[in-house]
Image (cartoon, coloured by chain):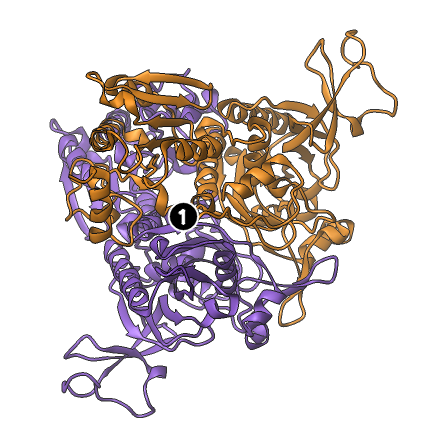
Chain colours: A purple, B orange
Amino acid sequence: MEPLLHQLGQRIIRCAPRTLICRKYTHGNGNGADHPSTGSSHTTPVLLVSRLYQPANLREVGQESRQAGEMTCKSQRLMQQAGLIHPSNPGCYYYLPATVRAMEKLVRLIDQEMQGIGGQKLDMPSLCSAELWRSSERWDLMGKELFRLQDRHGVDYCLGPTHEEAVTTLVAHQASLSYRQLPILLYQITRKFRDEPKPRFGLLRGREFYMKDMYSFDVSEEAARHTYDSVCQAYGRLFSRLGLRCLRVQADAGNIGGTLSHEFQLPADIGEDRLLVCGGCSFAANEETLAPGETDCPRCPAGPLAESKGIEVGHTFYLGAKYSRVFNATFSNQQNRPVVSEMGCYGLGVTRILAAAVEVMSTEEAIRWPGLLAPYQVCVVPPKKGSKGSEEGAAQTEGLVHALQGGLPRLRGEVVLDDRTQMTIGRRLKDAVRLGYPYVVVVGQGAQEETPRFEVICQQTDETMFLSKDQLVDLLGRVETV
Amino acid sequence: MEPLLHQLGQRIIRCAPRTLICRKYTHGNGNGADHPSTGSSHTTPVLLVSRLYQPANLREVGQESRQAGEMTCKSQRLMQQAGLIHPSNPGCYYYLPATVRAMEKLVRLIDQEMQGIGGQKLDMPSLCSAELWRSSERWDLMGKELFRLQDRHGVDYCLGPTHEEAVTTLVAHQASLSYRQLPILLYQITRKFRDEPKPRFGLLRGREFYMKDMYSFDVSEEAARHTYDSVCQAYGRLFSRLGLRCLRVQADAGNIGGTLSHEFQLPADIGEDRLLVCGGCSFAANEETLAPGETDCPRCPAGPLAESKGIEVGHTFYLGAKYSRVFNATFSNQQNRPVVSEMGCYGLGVTRILAAAVEVMSTEEAIRWPGLLAPYQVCVVPPKKGSKGSEEGAAQTEGLVHALQGGLPRLRGEVVLDDRTQMTIGRRLKDAVRLGYPYVVVVGQGAQEETPRFEVICQQTDETMFLSKDQLVDLLGRVETV
């Protein structure tokens, strides 16, 4: 009798040549008549590694995928090798499917945190008229960093790197905004453009990137500072949920303007920002905000500040009336008189957070993700086709995957099966470790014991355990997903 | 004693000044300590209409929101008046929060259908190098429709209106693609750019818009035609789930190229395409594919074709080797020899589907959405503050909302409470009807009867019912969401 997984492979090809999923492993109502597109929560597909468009897996005939572009840092190298990104023009990347999954998870997290403090999501045009940017005097100020173009009528536009002008003019256009309706917090998560002189470090410094930009409108400076603090706290919660140690440092407001500004920095050797951090209190600053030679903490007597480098992943600005005055964004106060709003703006580098997380969490050889962002949570590795015990192993795999799908709705779409059973377990395990699935489950010798045991490699903690099916389901049932 | 809703209003302001949600109505573990950002499925917030950034609601002091831009069709007028979109540059719109919600739902539906046939989602750069477009000879062919720009080094780019060049070169770069790994179906849902000579009809013909573009790579013409059919079927399912009657017509391949092409058209008076449809068989064609004067069906003897106008919402192309030959996108066949892939490409106008649905489903005065796309499913309208029975009404509202939140997880985030209780029920009801919530629940006189009854207006079917709380929960429990 042929190994079950092999039979399975043939069945897949016969039933569903164009799908990535293995019907055999769908749970509940997942019979042939149940179309996957119904989105029924009873049908949980298992994805097959051989079918995923992730070039690290596309090497059946033995070659590694080509590496293009100069490798300027670890995250770039690892992400290209793993088939997560592929270079296009300088500073521009294809985000391949696994990266899109990670990014969609990050977007859901950001949505939760921003909506938790009252943020409302909109989407503003990328094409920004020169007229708008001339009003704020940034058309000239931004220099070569702005991508500029003309339409067929010769009208000037730029591709928005940030949207203070656009959002302020939107809010200014709403007639009759009452003080009772403030604060208003509007945000978007869209592609931004910046013509970097030296794009490098993969997704860390690109010319096209995804950014979350939020803008707040308040009735007073006091209220605006309250909003500012609430956004900073939401950023803190986000990084804490990601398991990333993030420093909030005082920062320069740069081209954006305003009088109060902080950066959220992930300490990392390749960071382009130099930070000075106090060991005695919470003071931390970007070096550019301190006087030259200033080395002692201005807030406590703890002595000299420690130097560190950081990757900027977020930036907050209290803007005051800088933009609202120019575009006349007003509200009616209690006396029904128009008053200019107090604004803030708040950025998060979305694609940059992905790459920065890979940069700070990975080893030189293996990607590690914040658990919530991993493209897939679980990879199941069954025995090599034709090896000793591979039939029992295939049966065990089937039962296991069924149990995971049946019992754990949070793992829906999160389990991949490494069906490349022409390869040894060892070789596939090496791939799985390198790609950073948080949980790798090997169906090896132990699965044939009287009480079958599965080898589980928890990559976040670097632990290996041998668990029964029930224990494994219990462990994976506690995995958080978003 | 003050009406409960009024007390509630004060409580909201005290506890959570910056959130849109009313803690009082959260269910389950939703006590004060439970932060909304945890995303716990036990906490289902109720959104307050007075806090939604949807300018139709922002008129406490009595003015209607300003109407900017020329109104060229019904959907544009309705969407602007309702605070769904706001005009920016010609052919560019702000998508306001309710539209973003509708679009995210449409994106989830499209994801389900595309992934159901094996599609994998990636994301390609907007900046496309001239070099790439010169290879396919489209740099010149596209003329003024391409937005073109130069970077700081004088290198030419266009803003991608479509991505055949980009995706084909990506797939060509993957070393060692085996015939066993085909078909590959890659798609993205991103913003596209086209410098329309005459942008008009709101989101129907803009210069910036969201499009789903999928590209397929197959081993043979036969396999590619099979993929082509499977995408067409997925499109059919999508429109059927949206409740939109969509015609598939034979079409011209235009600038994209290839030998087989179909458009998916929604019949509508403002449609820019002229269609000829057979009454006797399934034949339908864009007029431009027929010989001048051709009025009889070429497939059956039913006689003259009927004329119709349509809005193109989808387009499919069988491309053959047009792009794969230029960029050398090959796979290894069974004999391990390189063979050029057979390609197809498949577009869906995402923002266009939203506007086209509003165009064909709405009345002149009131927006109607496909049920699955409505930004919110339910609007609850409690009595006017201080009116007869408003205290009991407020208590009934509380109980009702609690029951909806507690019992119906699919309505999570889908219920809004029109807390503008300084306005009469009638005035708020008029807004709710105009904005097109599929279900409007009025807590009126009937709620004070011994067996309280709620007035439920089902806007999709134009039915009004008076239901008990249990009947209402039962009805709304059957609402499909995505």
Direction from residue B154 to residue A278 in the image, left or right: left
The local secondary structure at tag 1 comes to: loop
Q: Please identify the residue farthest to the right as the structure is shown.
A: B293
Residue A167's place in the image compared with B296, above or below, is below
Residue B25's place in the image compared with B408, above or below, is below
What is the three-letter code of the residue carrying label 1?
Glu
The structure residue drawn at horizontal position 11% and vertical position 28%, both measured from the top left corner, is A451
> Would you name the residue on which mark 1 appears?
B60
Q: What crowding class fits label 1: few (fewer than 14 Cα within 10 Å), some (14-19), or many (20 or more)? A: some
Direction from residue B199 to residue A364 in the image, left or right: left
The number of numbered discs placed on residues in the rendered structure image is 1
Residue A253's place in the image compared with B377, above or below, is below
The answer to whether residue B176 of the structure is visible from this angle is no
Q: Nearer the viewer, residue A340 or B351?
A: A340
Residue B22's place in the image compared with A398, above or below, is below
Residue A98 point in image, percent of width and height? 41, 46
The structure residue drawn at horizontal position 36% and vertical position 32%, both measured from the top left corner, is B425
Q: Please identify the residue farthest to the left as the structure is shown.
A: A451
The answer to whether residue B281 of the structure is visible from this angle is yes
The structure residue drawn at horizontal position 20% and vertical position 38%, both measured from the top left corner, is B4
Residue B17 point in image, percent of width and height? 26, 54
Q: Quadrant of the C terminus of chain B?
A: top left
Residue B14 point in image, percent of width and height? 20, 53
Q: Quadrant of the N terminus of chain B?
A: top left
Q: Nearer the viewer, residue A263 or A14?
A: A263
